[in-house]
Image (spheres, rainbow, N blue to C red):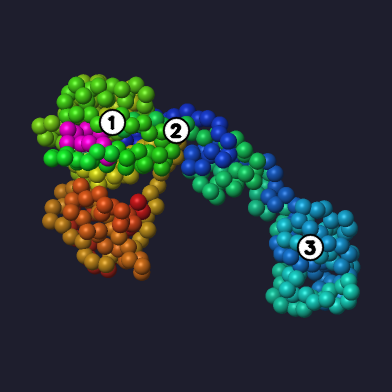
């Protein structure tokens, strides 16, 4: 049995880099940037007014100013501003030559048919200067960046309309277990519905992997071998849920070995999730996760998600939010690390969700995140600040 931290290192080290491809900008969301992006222009590209108001010379603020033109956004001013003059200017419009100040319209009054006066108040120049945000040639986004909405704005601003992004890893998902039926069926007798495959599908899709589902394999060597071989043919990563424990019908580790996977670990000192298996075979890796839905969920979040991101060249760092514990958390056995789902109240205090064990999947729906109890930690007192990893 190895620690979670050791397993994480092994998994990340085993991630081979996937290739890259160019996509249209509107398909780049959530993808991983595979190039450094530089700006092809200055931002802003011209001295720009930050306000609706009047562009003038600062030293003329104490007198009446003749309004010589109106500059709308997108128009080039036709006249320079001279002594005792101003131009009416709109937010985003180009500041005319000669002007070094924009007074907000709220700080002015009309003083003649075509003149205004500054009425006082806190004032600043209200000018965004050419190049003050970005200089031409500046590195604006780095390779490895996860593209979110704000990155889309940057890509658009610098004209990167076909960014290079990492290819999407192909992930085969297979369920195992004679007790499983697909959700369209009503389970009978000792059957239960397969929920893991749909959960995993969603988790893979959320990180822009390409999930393919291979159905439910029975707990027999033939069925497992057959399904695994199909999954191996078309994927970079395979996720098997169930069949990895030490029960009589937990045949997955053996089938992986038979298919020449080298198993880099077969047990983790984490709860839930102890019988997790990780194998590599040439360019394919396989995660065998214990079938309990909460274990499956957690292990994807904790190991597979960082792994898939690493393949795409992105160093995933899970955000952690310090929150206060509403009730003490304690446990008797401390030989494994534990990830505990917690719910938050409206004041931002957290407590473990009512949770009957790792099969209790709807407990996760009320959780905002997971807290971590390392090996040896038996208790966290009420009121302690804990790091919550959002899920
Ligand atoms: P196993 O890891 O195969 O020993 O399964 C552990 C528990 O998880 C058992 O109660 C299984 O019925 C359940 N389980 C296994 N696979 C799934 C699945 N795909 N969806 C929901 N529950 C599952
Ligand atoms: Mg099973």
Region in magenta: 175-183
Left or right placement of residue 57 versus residue 139 in this view: right
Q: Earlier in the sequence, mark 1 or mark 3?
A: 3
The residue to which callout 1 is attached is 215
Which element carries disc 1, helix, strand or loop?
strand
Query: Does residue 81 show up magenta in the picture?
Result: no
> Residue 325's quadrant in the figure?
bottom left
Q: Earlier in the sequence, mark 1 or mark 2?
A: 2
Residue 168: x %, y % from top left: 44, 33
- Within the displayed image, which quadrant is ligand 1 positioned in? top left
**Foreground pick, 380 / 182:** 182
Is the CB atom of the residue marked by disc 3 within 8 angstroms of ligand 1's nearest atom?
A: no
Residue at left offset 80%, top offset 77%: 109
Which element carries disc 2, helix, strand or loop?
loop
Residue 70 seen:
yes
Residue at left offset 28%, top offset 39%: 184
Structural distance between the alpha carbons of marks 1 and 3: 64 Å
Closer to the eye: label 1 or 2: 1
Which element carries disc 3, helix, strand or loop?
strand
The residue to which callout 2 is attached is 168
Q: Earlier in the sequence, mark 2 or mark 3?
A: 3
Closer to the eye: label 1 or 3: 1
Structural distance between the alpha carbons of marks 1 and 2: 22 Å
Residue 305: x %, y % from top left: 36, 41
Q: Residues within 10 Å of mark 2 (few under 14, many from 20)?
A: many
The residue to which callout 3 is attached is 89
Residue 87: x %, y % from top left: 84, 64
Query: Does residue 182 show up magenta in the picture?
Result: yes
* Disc 1 + disc 2, Cβ < 8 Å: no
């Amino acid at each position: 049995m190895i620690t979670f931290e050791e397993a994480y290192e092994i998994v990340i080290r085993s991630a081979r880099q996937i290739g890259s491809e160019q996509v249209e900008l509107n398909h780049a969301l959530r993808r991983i940037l595979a190039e450094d992006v530089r700006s092809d222009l200055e931002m802003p590209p011209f001295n720009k007014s930050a306000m609706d108001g009047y562009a003038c010379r600062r030293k003329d603020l104490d007198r009446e100013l003749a309004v010589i033109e109106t500059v709308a956004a997108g128009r080039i001013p036709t006249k320079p501003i001279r002594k005792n003059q101003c131009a009416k200017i709109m937010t985003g419009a180009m500041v005319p030559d000669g002007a070094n100040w924009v007074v907000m319209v709220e700080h002015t009054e009309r003083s003649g048919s075509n003149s205004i006066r500054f009425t006082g108040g806190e004032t600043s120049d209200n000018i965004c200067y050419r190049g003050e945000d970005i200089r031409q040639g500046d590195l604006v986004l780095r390779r490895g960046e996860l593209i979110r909405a704000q990155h889309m704005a940057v890509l658009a601003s610098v004209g990167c309309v076909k960014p290079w992004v990492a290819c999407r890893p192909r992930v085969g998902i297979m369920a195992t277990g004679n007790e499983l039926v697909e959700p369209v069926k009503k389970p009978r007798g000792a059957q239960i519905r397969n929920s893991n495959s749909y959960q995993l599908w969603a988790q893979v899709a959320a990180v822009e992997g390409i999930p393919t589902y291979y159905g439910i394999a029975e707990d027999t060597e033939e069925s497992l071998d057959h399904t695994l071989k199909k999954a191996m043919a078309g994927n970079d990563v395979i996720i098997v849920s169930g069949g990895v424990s030490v029960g009589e019908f937990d045949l997955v580790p053996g089938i992986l070995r038979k298919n020449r996977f080298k198993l880099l670990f077969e047990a983790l000192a984490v709860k839930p999730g102890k019988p997790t298996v990780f194998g590599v075979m040439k360019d394919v890796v396989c995660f065998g996760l214990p079938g309990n839905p909460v274990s499956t969920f957690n292990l994807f979040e904790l190991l597979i998600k960082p792994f898939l991101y690493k393949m795409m060249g992105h160093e995933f760092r899970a955000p952690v939010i310090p929150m206060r514990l509403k009730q003490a958390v304690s446990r008797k056995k401390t030989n494994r690390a534990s990830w505990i789902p917690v719910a938050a109240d409206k004041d931002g205090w957290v407590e473990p969700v009512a949770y009957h064990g790792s099969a209790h999947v709807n407990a996760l729906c009320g959780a905002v995140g997971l807290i971590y109890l390392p090996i040896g930690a038996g208790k966290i007192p009420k009121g302690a600040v804990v790091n919550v990893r959002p899920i």
